Structure formats: structure tokens, C-alpha cells
Amino acid sequence: MKKTIGSKQWHFGPYGGRYVPETLMKALEELTQAYRIFRANKKVQAELRHYLKDYAGRPTPLYEAKRLTEHFGRARIFIKREDLCHTGAHKINNTIAQALLARSLGKKRIVAETGAGQHGVASATAACVFGLDCVVYMGAHDIERQALNVYKMRLLGAKVVPVYSGSQTLKDATNEAIRDWVTTVDSTHYLIGSAVGPHPYPAIVRDFQAVIGRETRTEFLRREKRLPDYLMACVGGGSNAIGFFHAFLKDRKVKIIGIEAAGEGRAGVLHGMKSYLLQNKDGQVQLAHSISAGLDYPSVGPEHSFLKDSARVRYEAVTDREALEGFKLLTQVEGIIPALEPSHAFGYLKKLMPKTRKSQIVAVCLSGRGDKDIHTVQKFLKV
Ligand SMILES: *Cc1c(COP(=O)(O)O)cnc(C)c1O
């Protein structure tokens, strides 16, 4: 891997950049240019809005959770319902948009990585919509754990390639997807699944997910004539969180909290970017271990690292046990079965809510529904 000299616009403070082999530099530059045109093209933007509305199901509801509010007896709690998106999570916002972008680049093939299989399913789905070939790299260990999503991807016509290197999980699948892209870059778009990777990916994925926060902000102003006091979302690579937060970053009075599964990292380089990275004292990547495969990523998007250093966003860690409590709480009090990733955010309410007042508002991003996690939860929660 060659270290490349960055220009300022490639970075979020000291984070981000392009740490990639020479062969990808041209492709990343081409992607940057194509994205600029894509954003300015009114016809394509209208097409994107059409797919987000009529296919993905946007805008998603902003639900006032009155029973959950009553449970804590403090601030009012609102939930942004990304779980109601087609394919069951926010991932479709990004895959539909990137598939459209791939089409504008004239690429007929997409490659993607997946951990729990959610991004794989969302990519395979978007590939159907635009008639693209789709190859999904997935760790052999994850393939075993997520048989249902593997079957769904194959039903949708995608080729699922097992990855046997390293820990046989998401980190290794990402390496393989990048390796594929290096050799097929003329015909292929790499459809990355979170706000990570070399520039311009973290900015592109953030922009594609920013619809979550824009809708939330508009809805609060319309209904409540005010903004929420707190925003909360779970952080894996960080795409649902940055998408939820982005429209509020300039609203200094809105306190923003990102909820993570694993502990803190140090600045390091992985998958083409510099960011906070879990590593041992020799700089070897340390695996994240979480009950939710979607938070099982050893790094975060570079913009999150920047927001952490600048203290605009606070990041808190939540344990598996607390996440399961959050899962149970939302299920039993509101009748909404959440994915384990956002269950971390609901688990944190127990710590946050006692510090809030009745006149305040807390908004939580429910990034996805829990169907994929029922098997995991069964092992821990007896009913
Ligand atoms: C993939 C996934 C996540 C983690 O990814 P981010 O990029 O951090 O959003 C969180 N929640 C759900 C439901 C997911 O499927």
C-alpha cells in the first residue's frame, strides 16, 4: 500500500485521505468527478428521489414513542424509523444511490463487502433495480452465521464469494472487495457499505444517508416548531449516524451522541483511510467483538474521528448486555423489534434519560429492524 500525499479537501481534520495502491488513484479521481456531475444533474437527482420515495419507502416516519417516554418519565423520545425502509434498514438509501452513480459511470458490475449480510442484500437489491451484475464478498465465518441473508442475496441474483483469510469476517471481506476492484476497475464500481474507505467514499456515503437527518430536522420544525435537544445513533462504520447527525451539526444547541460497541482506538490506517482504529501495541488491527455483526468493525468513518476530536459529537460505548436490555425495552414497551445495532442506542437511554427534563426532546435513529438478529437474541433472552 502506497501512502499518498493528501490535499486538504480529502480530509476531515487529520483523518480520511487516500491510502490506496496507484491503480486505484485514477478510479477514485474519476469517481470524484462523476459524483460532482451526479449531484448537479437535476434529472438524475429527480430519479434518485423517485426511487427513495416509491421503492425504498421514504420519507420514513418520525414516531413519538409515548410509552417509552412514560417509562423513563423525563424527556419526550422520538424514533426515526429507518427500520421501515425496504430491506429493513437504512442501507438501501446508499445502495440505490450508488447503483445510480455506477450507472452514470457506465459501470455494469458492482462489488460489495458485507458483514451481517445487510449491505449485501441491499446491494443485490439495488443491482436488480438497475440491471447490474453484483458480487458480494463475505467472510466464511459470517456466511455460517447469516445463512438467511446469504440465501436472499443468491435469490436476488448476486454471487456471494466466501473469504477465508484473516478472521473470516467483515474486515477481510473488505480487503477482498478492494482487491477485486483493483483488477476490474474499468468495468466495476465498488459499492462501499458505510461512511468509510478512501476519499471520496466517506463523503459520498454521508451525503446519501444525510436524507435521514434532513427529514428528521424538517419534521421537528414542522410539528414541534423546534429542534430536539439530543440526537442519538449507533456507530459501526458510522453511516446511519453521520446521516442522522449531518443536518444538525451546525445547530450548536443540539447535543449529539454516537453509540459504539467496542472501546476506543488510536489513529491508524485501514481500508484506504486514516481514522480511529482498534489496534494492539504493534499496530496490528484488533478485532472488534460485538453481539451485533454490524458494529463489529475495528474502525469508524474518518468524519466521526474528526467530530470526536472537535468534541461536536460525544461517543459512548455500550456493552452487549446493555444492548440486549435496549432490545427488550423497545420490543416490549413499544412493540418494535429493533436490530441489535440500534439496540445499543436504546440501551444507552437508561444512562441518558435521568439527566434530561420533561421539557426536552431526545431523538433516536432506529437504523434497522430485528429480524436478522432473532436467532442471536434467542440464545440470551428467555421468554
Ligand atoms: C449495517 C448496520 C449498521 C452499522 O452500519 P453504519 O454504517 O454504522 O450505519 C447499523 N444498523 C443497522 C441496522 C445495520 O444494518
Image: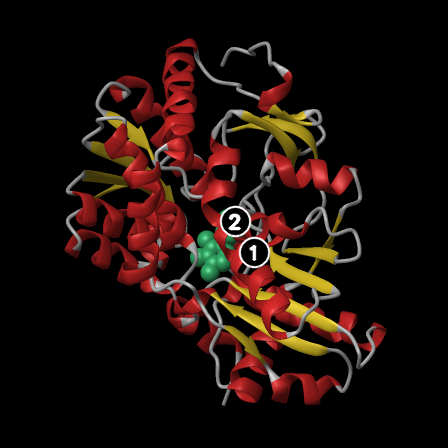
340 with respect to 66 (left or right): left
Figure quadrant of residue 103: top left
Could you say whether the residue bearing mark 1 is in a helix, strand or loop? helix
Residue drawn 17% across the image and 53% down it: 156
Figure check: 224 above or below 43? below
What residue would you read off at disc 2?
210
Q: Is residue 293 visible?
A: no
Q: How many marks?
A: 2
Could you say whether the residue bearing mark 2 is in a helix, strand or loop? loop
**The one of 311 and 342 positioned closer to us in this rendering:** 311
* Amino acid type shown at disc 2: Ala
Figure check: 338 above or below 285? below
Residue 85 on image: x %, y %: 38, 64
Residue 58 on image: x %, y %: 39, 62
The numbered disc on residue 213 is 1
How far apart are the two marked residues, 2 and 1, measured between alpha carbons? 5 Å
Residue drawn 63% across the image and 37% down it: 303
Q: Is residue 75 visible?
A: yes
Residue 261 on image: x %, y %: 63, 55
